[in-house]
Image: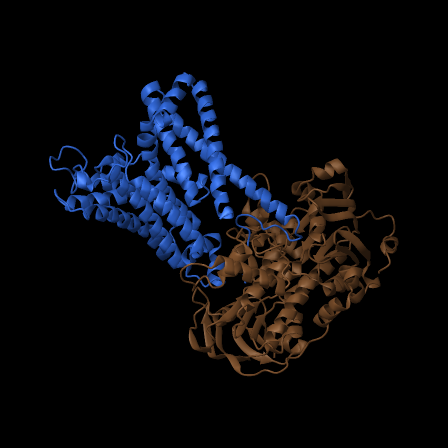
Chain colours: A blue, B brown
Amino acid sequence: MNRALAPVLAAIARVAVLLAVTLGLLVVLLVTSGYDAGEAMQAMVRGAAGSWYAVTSATLVRAIPLALAGLAVAIAFRAGLLNIGAEGQLLAGAAGAAAVATLAGKTPGAYMLPLVLLAGVVAGGAWAGIASWLRQRFGVLEVISTIMLNFVALNAVGWLVRGPLQEPTRIYPQTEALVPSLQLPVLLSGSRLHLGVVLAVVLAFVMWWWMRATAGGFRLRAVGMNADAAAVSGRINVARVSLFAFLASGALAGLAGAVELTGVTYALYESLSPGYGYTAIAVALLARLHPLGVLGTAVLFGALQAGGNAMQRDAGVPIALVNVVEAVLILLVIAADRLQDVRTRRSITRTDDAAPSLPGNAVSVPS
Amino acid sequence: MIPDHDSNAQSTQGASAPPALALRNISKSFGDVRALHNVDLFIRPGTVHALLGENGAGKTTLMRIAFGLATADEGTIHIGQTRLSEADARAHTPANAMSLGLGMVHQHFSLVAAMTVAENIALGNRGRFTPAQVANTVREISERTGLTLDPHAQVGELSVSAQQRCEIVKALARNARVLILDEPTAVLAPDEARALLRWVRAFANEHPDHAVVLITHKLRDALAIADDVTVLRRGELVATGSAQSLTESSLADAMLGPHDRSAQLTEEVVPLIKRHTDSVGAHYVVLQADALTVHDTRGVPRVRQASFTVRSGEVVGLAAVEGSGQAELLRAVAGLLPVHSGRLHRPDDVGFVPEDRHRDALLLDASLTENFALRDAGVRRGRVPWNELAERTNVVLRDRDVRASNASVTVRTLSGGNQQKFVLARALDDAPPALVIENPTRGLDFRATAAVHTALHNARDAGIAVLFYSSDLDEVLTVADRVLVLHNGLLREVPRERDAVGRAMLGVS
């Protein structure tokens, strides 16, 4: 158990370091662009963690979709699939959930809320399934197909909320607000923190356990580490594992969308997600694709978003500044990981007489 | 121990010719591991110099230092007339080495598969790229050296030996005077290897100011064509001298060292080189093919109407030149490629050891336990009993003499020989009725090769039907009880004689 928890502790340490680096970078940016750094940082901290309400209703509420979509990205990346399409799958999930909610009418039964969430899961999975099919049928790289499908999803939602799913008065480009029985229950009265947080935590633990302990999880990791060896030496059906990883990833992202719809926005509209699906990539990478680490980094990014909004509102500092910091942070972390990888690899290959494997497109010897 | 022939070698050439490449007092440590200790190497112009040693002896490291890919802790480098001081040697780079006339062909080629030969050769040059001009350079070098190569062919489409020629021409196009070839015959079929060695010999004869350094662990190659031989063992120079003054057995002694000349090792190594232990008797048919036709993944027929049997308790060797259909045949028997037509009778459980360990057999960054678990990963249901598997893996490591501190280290930290022993142990763990292996000892040193051969014979004696392919004809002849030869997709059984097998491989009857 000790060894299993080590990555979790490491992730916590990373989040702490990242937090410090983030705030430092932010101060530098604020000063250099001529803002009152003190006032801005105060607003930032107040907005993210200044009060019980800020923590639960600003930071944690934003961390929920980030965590679910972060798990979606992590499971795909662990299988070696660069699913950049969590945003599109999230929107597809929200749209699917909204469609079922609309069909449910004015007085839905208690069983309808799980069905609405399930619709999000199915819609998100189906959206990712398109990319999987393109990959396996035509060899289209998922990096390209998923990012393109993001735009398709966004525009499809735009059409839905002006067409079949538009609210009855046909004035606003959005769906009718969900009736209370289709809204996720609020956990703490007086806050906006909803049941989705429990869902995210439970799913993170389930995914962590599943990947470590089960044959299916091991197959998924093996395919991600070396698909050729998985197929030849493990007799693993790589296509099936990839399809599963795509569907699971899309399902998790779709759930993020459905949870956001039923827990926060209560209606479908185009700007439902402020790029949660994209930020989720950073969330997953900073957590080194570890499901429990995702919970930590999701809170970090949730706090940044919440604080950034407060900074914009109270100190007049554009939130773009926070986005810059996020982006720099991702680059730093990726660079640091790479450097560490290269170092450990060098120190190992150096003791071996064998030439180190050449990177990139060196010609391999055909068998 | 062999007397030091260094003075002898130099006197034959005379003091007037300075070495084409000289490394003096080179030392290099990686952490606590001393990779090289006070090693000297003198390459005379106009000669072929064989650098011998087991894996891990430091041969490649020494040459990587000369080529600027690694830096020495101590020592100086002379390339032609240029002397690099210790400080210069530390700042040495491949670009520098190339400008001074060194060229190195690595064991794993550094070519861009999607580019043409001409583009690969121009890669790294400055200024404009004029395909016609580079093509002319390639043709000129081809004519001058006899390395035939189509400048406009795409490298990915070329055979391995043509890719190797491309690497050599690339070095020569940059005016390399000293060519360093790292295990060049490891990837070649026997006839290709012979052709390459002949070429190396002729190249040195015809260019009195050039030289070739041949990094190898094949004694026969070294003695056949080299003028001078230097032997490294555990980072130290143990013998150097002219090839004429050395014999296969004295070199083997030098490579293995006095500590290792125990009775046990002699028993292990000597039969491997010279003798063959015959099967105690084959029993019932385990693998049987009748008019078997196999297509590759692109649908091209690679094996046509092959019929053969492999019985329990025998080792059947498959000999073929590169690309004759052996990969497809073995993969069909292993159950990894579908049978197109004909009949293939095979047990459900066939152990398979692929040729490319890193690509097809191992998860390099996963633990030994996880790699061990990989074997059953495709069929396992429910939870993985990790603790049980870790214990089992530790037992296997001990029983099969795989050197690793424990089952939780990553495979990447193991040497090539231990990785191969581990892959073999994994395939044999539940005693499958049949075992299929591609190139069982590719890239392995003496001792690891002996261990793998012993493991194969043990498996046979335990009643397993073993079918293996090797690009090394000697390995097929020494290890196999029976020999099958594939030529251009057609299979036939051939008596276990060098001539007969060699001719059949080339399609000559």
Say which quarter of the image contains residue B128.
Answer: top right
Which residue is pictured at 71% across the width and 69% down the height?
B268
| As drawn, A206 above or below B490 | above
Which residue is pictured at 57% across the width and 43% down the height?
A342
Res B508 visible: no
| As drawn, B126 above or below B430 | above
Task: Give coordinates of residue B453: x percent, y percent.
Answer: 65, 69
Residue A109 located left or right of residue B231: left
| As drawn, A150 above or below A19 | below
Which residue is pictured at 60% across the width and 53% down the height?
B109
Task: Give coordinates of residue A235: x percent, y percent.
Answer: 45, 64
Which residue is pictured at 76% across the width and 60% down the height?
B255
Res B328 visible: yes
| As drawn, A26 above or below B61 | above
**In the foreground, B81 or B332:** B332
Task: Give coordinates of residue A18: x percent, y percent.
Answer: 47, 32
Number of marks in picture: 0
**In the foreground, A81 or B223:** A81
Residue B496 located left or right of residue B349: right
Say which quarter of the image contains residue B142.
Answer: bottom right
Q: Where the C terminus of chain A falls, by quadrant?
A: bottom right
**In the foreground, B108 or A306:** A306
Residue B193 located left or right of residue B258: left
Task: Give coordinates of residue A165: x percent, y percent.
Answer: 17, 41
Say which quarter of the image contains residue B422.
Answer: bottom right
